[in-house]
Amino acid sequence: MSNPTDLHYTKEHEWLKVEGDVATIGITAYAAEKLGDVVFVDLPKVGAKTTYMKICGEIESTKSVGELYSPVDGEVVEVNGDVTNAPELVNQDAFGAGWLIKVRFEALPELMTAAEYDAFTGE
Amino acid sequence: MAKTVLHDEHLKLGASFTDFGGWDMPVRYSSDLAEHHAVRNAAGVFDISHMAEIFISGNQAADFLDFALIGIASEIGIGRAKYSMICNHEGGIIDDLIVYRLAEDNFLIIANASNRQAVATALKARSEGFDTKVDDQSDDWALIAIQGPKATGILQKLTDANLAELKYYSIAEATVADASAYLCRTGYTGEDGFEVLVSAEQATKVWNDILSAGADDGLIAAGLACRDTLRLEAGMPLYGHELDEQHTPIDAGMAKVVRLDEGHNFVGREALEKITEPRERLIALVGVGKRAARADYELKHPATGETIGVVTSGALSPTLGYPVAMAYIRDGNFGVGDTISLDVRGNLEPYKIVKLPFYKREH
């Protein structure tokens, strides 16, 4: 699997696509693969505040529970309802249709590039 | 980590691996849900060569097993099998296992991989004074399970044995994919199927022949992730989760496996026959919504909030679409039909006590 170069990455295996002051956030294909088939996604509501490195959602597979850590301080402006109804989108298209939330952020923390994330995961 | 003889085949199929009892085992090949559904609707093939095969022979083999296990092996007909357990002197479960009777004085025990040493050691110690031999041949054998409604039709293409005649919980010698095999009509999925015991040298061909023979019927290789959800739906206990040395067969709802017949002297009897009320009981729970209870989550009294038990296994059931779990409950006041609270990562969720199994095949 290849990690798109236009995205930013975290050590908690999230990706961010930054457009202005809004970041679209999902989990990486690597993380989805490690989790196995995702069967339930619990996401924050629109308007919820997120705090850097605080848990803001859960991604459950048949075998385990993955936590979604907010990579930024901010406010949720959109939630992917498609993925709530069809959690398998996280496995099928982690970097696209499987996105989770959009957050309006105040500042970006230090994030990894695709190359750095490749090295981090040893891919 | 230990590897089965089929490890390279799993690599070729693109499997992800997990450490299971010290074995590097395929957890899934692509999708554990797809593998789960394949077993329920068509067929799946599992490498379970990590499991232990211990052969018991000799004039007193049957008498010895009657003493060593909690069941009565001497009652098993030749070619038949029985689910049983081996317990310690306190009645704690050392392992659950299947006993197959190969001949008057020849038995095969298939035990859990993680308990191989414990079972072999206990059997050898208990065999003292009996005219019997305990022979742990686990390294020489591979075990391949083919499970699902299409398993019989697929396997029939590869064997001279008449599978229609092989009853549930039976064993027969047969040729499978040109290999000499023991064919066991047993499994751990809640579906009909077989477990094929072949020599390690012959395993790769048998594995690949089964995959080819079943391809048109939707058979796929299936990993341990779906094996776990399949057995959970079928209400089958897993050692290390529902069963351990801290629990007796009676705690685990397996009182009928303990044979307290007059004159049946066996290790653990003294402790087990004293039990009138178990300390804890294994129960089945179903939830609403999608938030699955997982092992170690706590059961709470719905009125007082007091902790009354703990989950041993849980998942969102792929077949049923709602959460299912098994748990030990300490409070004797709750029974089938009652609702308790379950602490799912800080949220109390209602879970209803039901009867096992969660899933039963139709035919």
Image (cartoon, helix red, strand yellow):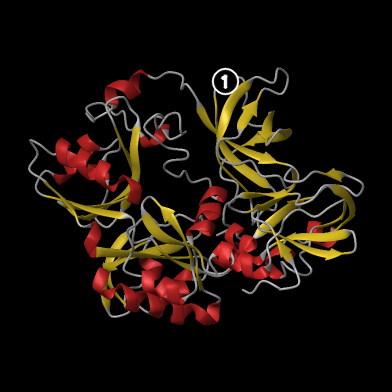
In the figure, is residue B138 to the left or right of B19?
left
Residue B62 position in % (x across, y down) = 18, 44
In the figure, is residue A55 to the left or right of B35?
right
Residue at position x 92%, y 47% from top? A47
On screen, B30 above or below B20? below
Q: Give the position of the C terminus of chain B as an image quadrant.
A: bottom right
Q: Nearer the viewer, residue B121 or A121?
A: A121
Residue at position x 38%, y 60% from top? B48
- The secondary structure type at the circle numbered 1 is loop
Residue at position x 90%, y 63% from top? A20
Q: Give the position of the N terminus of chain B as an image quadrant.
A: bottom left
Q: Nearer the viewer, residue B68 or B6?
A: B6
Quarter of the image for residue B302 reads top right
Quarter of the image for residue B180 reads bottom left
Question: Label 1 is found on which chain of the structure?
Answer: B
Q: Nearer the viewer, residue B106 or B112?
A: B112
Q: Which amino acid, by three-letter code, is at mark 1?
A: Gly
Mark 1 burial class by Cα count in 10 Å: few <14, some 14-19, many 20+: few
Residue B139 position in % (x across, y down) = 23, 60
Q: Which residue is mark 1?
A: B332
- Residue B112 visible? The answer is no
On screen, B12 above or below A109? below
Residue B116 position in % (x across, y down) = 28, 48
Residue at position x 45%, y 54% from top? B188
